[in-house]
Amino acid sequence: MDEILKQTLLYDFYGELLTKHQKEIYEQAVLEDYSLSEIARDAGISRQGVHDMIRRCNKSLEDYEAKLHLVEKFMSVKKKVHEIDLLLENYEEQDEKELIKKVKKLSGEIIEEL
Amino acid sequence: MDEILKQTLLYDFYGELLTKHQKEIYEQAVLEDYSLSEIARDAGISRQGVHDMIRRCNKSLEDYEAKLHLVEKFMSVKKKVHEIDLLLENYEEQDEKELIKKVKKLSGEIIEEL
């Protein structure tokens, strides 16, 4: 997975567990794509300080995911719901019984995972 | 929601964020329903110590949920997947177009939430 997308997803799920200060810096760097120098100037800390903080935030977010696996779980569920969506999109081209069977299989798998 | 069910769900989601010792005590108390005295004796701590630890664990788990709302989200998604399941269960009694429309509406709502 693309590194920025991965960071964004991890932040979506676990960002609230960072401190207010960490969140501000992290959002500027990862979500708003400011340069380290710009963030350092605004926050009144060194460029190295910003860099270290972002690295520590990434480590925290990854540690939460390593323990809870919620991003992984939600991605898998989302993929299956999209498959249901796609099946229904083209329902007129398919045999009804087959379609229902496939959707039921997917919904069963989703419930198993939740 | 029933208090034990709520604690069990919170523990399912966030239990890995407790310490190993906290997890052992919490599992004995909440999931395996041992008495405080039994747990205290096994762990070699006071009954009051066990009581305080469980209270602190509950507070931690509730704090995580207050920040991340993942149990709430998960319950809502699960409910909607069950609705899809139920609609498909009785698909022969329903108008096909109506059925597809309802299921698509639910799958869309689930994707929004994830």
Image: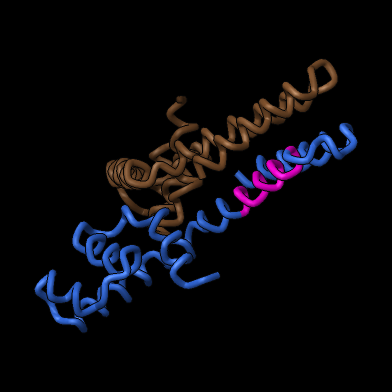
Chain colours: A blue, B brown
* Magenta residues, dominant SS class: helix
Q: Residue at x 28, y 43 (%)?
A: B52
Q: Quadrant of residue A26?
A: bottom left
Residue B47 in view, yes or no: no
Q: How many marks?
A: 0
Residue B69, x across and y down, in percent: 40, 41
Q: Residue at x 29, y 45 (%)?
A: B56
- B82 over B45 or under it: above or below: above
Q: Which residues are magenta?
A: A76-88
Q: Is residue A82 magenta?
A: yes
Q: Is residue A44 magenta?
A: no
Where's the N terminus of chain B, which quadrant?
Answer: top left
Q: Residue at x 60, y 31 (%)?
A: B80
Q: Quadrant of residue A24?
A: bottom left
- Front-most of residues A24 and A59: A24
| Residue that lies at the very extreme toward the left in this rendered image | A44
Residue B23, x across and y down, in percent: 44, 53
In the shown orientation, is residue B3 left or right of residue A101?
A: left
Residue B41, x across and y down, in percent: 40, 48
Residue B70 in view, yes or no: yes
In the shown orientation, is residue A19 left or right of residue A71?
A: left
Residue A91, x across and y down, in percent: 80, 36
Q: Quadrant of residue B99?
A: top right
